[in-house]
Image (tube, helix red, strand yellow):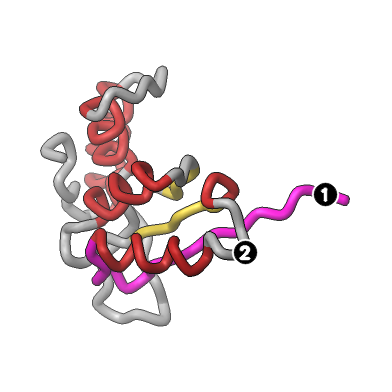
Amino acid sequence: GGEIEIALGETLGVAIPEDIERMLAVVSETTPIGELDLHLHDTNGRAVDCAARALELGVRRFDASCAGLGGCPYAPGAAGNLATEDLLEMLERDGWSTGIDHAKVRLAAKIAAEITGRPVRNAGSG
């Protein structure tokens, strides 16, 4: 038996922290929260807040992408993913040690944004 990984996706990017809390309450009836991954999009600029709430509730694995790159072909107009640099800033601000060099991640986000022509969303602002 291999390990099973369950990822919950909020690909429209419209959730608020209370939505994440309700979703996790239902899922936790059958699956320990610590075994879940959370995939958030940042359409309305609340992905970091949703990640922070999920972290408080026990989620420890998050999908994120440099400069928030990505999107969903099934959700036209939805923004990209939770930005790695924003997730790192929130984690460090809340006392979590990541061991990741923020300056290098911000530089990678800047380069990715320049290459793709997409602006860096919220990078460094939390």
Residue 125, quarter of picture: top left
User: Contact (CB < 8 A) between labels 2 and 1?
Assistant: no
Q: Can you say whether 46 is above or below 87 in the image?
A: below
Q: Amino acid at mark 2?
A: Thr
Q: Is residue 8 magenta?
A: yes
Q: Is residue 35 magenta?
A: no
Q: Quick one: SS at disc 1?
A: loop
**Stretch in magenta:** 1-16
Q: Residue furthest front?
A: 29
| Distance between the alpha carbons at the discs numbered 2 and 1 | 18 Å
Residue corresponding to mark 1? 2
Q: Position of residue 38 (x, y in %)?
A: 45, 55
Label 1 Cα neighbours within 10 Å, binned few <14 / some 14-19 / many ≥20: few
Q: Amino acid at mark 1?
A: Gly
Q: Can you say whether 64 is above or below 104 in the image?
A: below
The number of numbered discs placed on residues in the rendered structure image is 2
Residue corresponding to mark 2? 30
Quadrant of the snapshot with the C terminus: top left
Residue 50, quarter of picture: bottom left
Q: Position of residue 71 (x, y in %)?
A: 36, 66
Label 2 Cα neighbours within 10 Å, binned few <14 / some 14-19 / many ≥20: few
Q: Quick one: SS at disc 2?
A: loop
- Magenta portion: prevailing SS class: loop
Q: Position of residue 53 (x, y in %)?
A: 30, 49
> Is 39 positioned to the left or the right of 56 in the image?
right
Query: Is any part of residue 111 visible from this angle?
Result: no
Q: Nearer the viewer, residue 123 or 13?
A: 13
Query: Is any part of residue 21 visible from this angle?
Result: yes
Q: Which comes before the other along the chain, label 2 or label 1?
A: 1
> Is 31 positioned to the left or the right of 115 in the image?
right
Residue 73, quarter of picture: bottom left
Residue drawn 30% across and 81% down?
A: 76
